[in-house]
Amino acid sequence: MKLRYEEVTLHLKHTFRLHGGSKESVRILIAYLEQDGLIGLGEADPSKYYGETPESVKSVWDRIDFSNHRDPFLYEPIYNDLREKFPNDHAALAGIDIAMFDWVAKYWQMPLYQFLGLDKSAIPETSFTIGHASEKKLIEKIKEAEAFHVLKIKLGTDFDEDIIKTVRKYSNKPIRVDANEGWTREEALKKIKWLEDKNVQFVEQPLKKEDIEGHAWLKEKVSLPIFADESARVPADIYKLRDAFDGVVIKLMKAGGIQNAIEMARLAHRFEMKTQISCFLETSVAISAAAQISPLFDYADLDGHLLIADDPFKGLSLEDGKIMFNDNPGLGVEKR
């Protein structure tokens, strides 16, 4: 196998604000994994939060010796070998994992979901993310989300109640709240209690990721489900979180790719936890990879490609509130 890659800067439609900062653009890397004239597409969207950068991804990809991995059909042992060599480089691993699956499914001339034996009719509705904004901007974003059935609202501010009141003034749609570790225990308890009659489906990561005990304490005191996001990165985390959370948010870039994400979803369901497949700000390559496995999940939050102004790929659509892929081989995406 031969690997080449390119770095792409994606520009956002709106400044994206959440607890901890804001951004106008993101740098991602697209992988092109070639074997026998066939190319598998992958994507790495590294997060500084987890200590990864575009430079760290390039460093990993430059060091992979594919002379020892000549057969993409052996995607599982290849992935296990790379995971052992680069245990902390999850975005880099995700990019290669996605590319291998795209290659294999293309080889067999079938869409990835079909190769994995998944039911396309089980795709869950996706939410549309609204970050911190002024009332005027919130109204604009609510209108922009008209085609979506569920809204995801970023909180973790000093004006959380004002945000929700504005949203509720202009929309009755179900909402999912993401505090991004922005609350203390007592603050979370007060705010979640206040949210309980606001048609909220669940609350993501109200406390710091290390505070597992605090989340267990909070879970016993509120009626809304509490989902782990930053606290849940790899399959082993599910064992530590199962008594402290009602559900888990799984992202390909955070988990290290498709294989780890599937394992996490199955473990969570074994422990009767709900699951949401989610994303960072990504192109249609990574979003399609996540969408292809979304039938395994209870919820989806796959709007990352819709928040950027210059997605270099196409192949996804929004149908009845769901991110839908086509039935072309592999991920079903191509360059614009």
Image (spheres, rainbow, N blue to C red):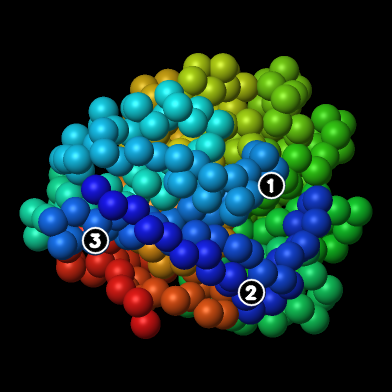
Q: Where is mark 3, residue-wise? A: 39
Q: Residue 264 at x, y = what percent?
A: 41, 31
- Residue 271 location, quadrant: top left
Disc assigned to residue 12? 2
Q: Nearer the viewer, residue 52 or 259?
A: 52
Q: Is 249 in front, or is 88? A: 88
Q: Residues within 10 Å of mark 3 (few under 14, many from 20)?
A: many
Earlier sequence position, callout 3 versus callout 2: 2
In this image, 277 relative to 80: left or right?
Answer: right
N-terminal label among 1 and 2: 2
Query: Quick check: 298 left or right of 216?
Result: left
Judged by depth in the image, the label closer to the viewer, 3 or 2, is 3
Q: Amino acid at mark 1?
A: Lys
> Which residue type does callout 3 highlight?
Ile
Image point 59% across, 27% down: which residue? 245
Q: Nearer the viewer, mark 3 or mark 1?
A: 3
Three-letter amino acid code at the position of disc 2? Leu
Q: Are marks 1 and 2 in contact (CB under 8 Å)?
A: no
The circle drawn on residue 48 is 1
Specify whether residue 167 is in view. Answer: no
* Residue 284 seen anywhere in this rendered image of the structure: yes
Query: Separation of disc 1 and disc 2 at Cα?
Result: 18 Å
Regarding mark 2 in the picture, which secondary structure is present there?
Answer: strand
Which image quarter holds the C terminus?
A: bottom left
